[in-house]
Amino acid sequence: MSTTILRRRSAMFAAMLALLLLVTACSGTTREDDTADAPEEDSAATTEEEADAPTEDEATDEPAATENTPEAAATTEDAGDDTADGATAIEEGIEIAFLPKQINNPYFTTADGGGEEAVGEFAGSYSEVGPSEASASSQVSYINTLTQQGVGAIAISANDPNAVCPALNEARDAGIAVVTYDSDTDPSCRDLFINQASAEGIARVQVEMVAEQIGGAGEIAVLSATPNATNQNAWIELMEGILADEYPDIELVTVAYGNDDDQDSFTETQALLQSYPDLAGIVSPTTVGISAAARYLSGSEFKGEVALTGLGTPNQMREFVEDGTVTAFALWNPADLGYLAAYAGGALASGLITGAEGDTFEAGKLGSYTVEADGSVLLGPPTVFDIDNIGDFDF
């Protein structure tokens, strides 16, 4: 081989070696760039995710945002309504049993009719039971039967304040609410008493009416219901005090009892006029008594000569007011009395109230009532009826 050829081969090998070193150098630079770019991409991605992710405070606020959605608002409102209903509504289906002094008495027919109206309003179950005679113990067997039946509440007008107490306490022990209306029992054997008007107010309005009708002087008599009737006895006692203090020229000569029986009251009226020929007026704080007395007076020589007043219903007394036998009498609305008793019984039986002083409850169209001392709830003041307004009432 010639020297020239060797030189050419050495030059070519040197050139190829230089090219190889150049390629190797360029390839190593490229991998390093890729490695340097990778952390930058990861870092950017992490930064974007951190930007989109809620901060700790934002995460805490998320439930509040959920509650503000319409669905959440509706749920909240529903919960509020349920709570309100549970606090104020009488449970549907509660049985309220009315036990008047006697059935077929127009006064109690009206009162219990008001109770039936109320029970219908709160979708309860209404019933009325009772004796045909207003004797002291005649209501006991009815109370026992109602207890066995497990009614929700008993609304009773007591013929005697104590005779019915053992039976009523057995009813209360069985979980039955007891409400008295019109005539109370001993407070220890009932939950509430629905007082038609304050005893002082009822006594005073009757004294004022008879005093005005007889000119402030003369003899008067009282024709009451039964000797044990709690309400009549309380009113009579107060009337005696008012007469003694404020009407010294009026003398209360006697108290007679017609036993809340029409014929007995009619007969007692006749006897009073025969026994006391100077009698100027009669006060009868019972609807049965005053209507029977008016019927006797209207057909007698005493019509227009002997005043008659007391407590009666407009429908019973209308003809005697219109024919001049009676000038004026008073009463509360017995339908409202029974209506209020029903709502009170429903509220007790539903656990809305306990009968404690200061308890309040709603009574439909009559509005809100508050329990006063001794578990008493006052309906309102009595209304005086005369020729000018009796046509406005129908009960």
Image (tube, rainbow, N blue to C red):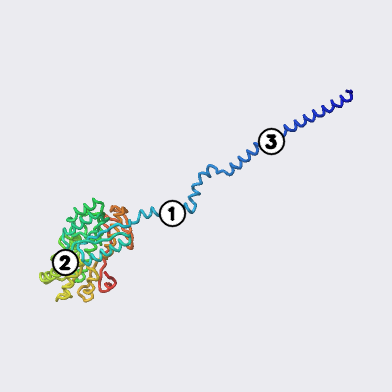
Amino acid carrying label 2: it is Asp
Residue 195, image x, y percentages: 25, 60
Cα separation, mark 3 vs mark 1, equals 60 Å
The numbered mark, 3 or 2, whose residue comes first in the sequence reads: 3
**Which SS class for mark 3?**
helix
User: In the rendered image, which residue does mark 3 sit on?
Assistant: 34
Q: Is residue 64 above or below residue 261?
A: above
* Residue type, numbered disc 3: Asp
Q: Which residue is mark 2?
A: 261
Q: Is residue 283 visible?
A: no
In the picture of the structure, the residue carrying the numbered disc 1 is: 77
Closer to us: mark 3 or mark 2?
Answer: 3
Query: Relative to 323, does residue 15 appear above or below in the rendering?
Result: above
In the image, which disc is placed on residue 169?
none
* Quarter of the view holding residue 97: bottom left
Structural crowding at the residue carrying mark 2, measured as other residues with C-alpha within 10 Å and reported as few (<14), some (14–19) or many (≥20)? some
Q: How many marks?
A: 3
Location of the C terminus (image quadrant): bottom left
Please report the residue visible at 30 percent of the width from the left and 64 percent of the height from the top.
117
The foreground one among 93 and 374 is 93
Name the one closer to the observer, 333 or 104: 104
Q: Residues within 10 Å of mark 3 (few under 14, many from 20)?
A: few
Task: Answer above or below: position of 279 versus 181.
Answer: below
What amino acid is labelled 1 in the image? Glu
SS at circle 2: loop
In this view of the protein, can residue 81 be seen by the observer? yes
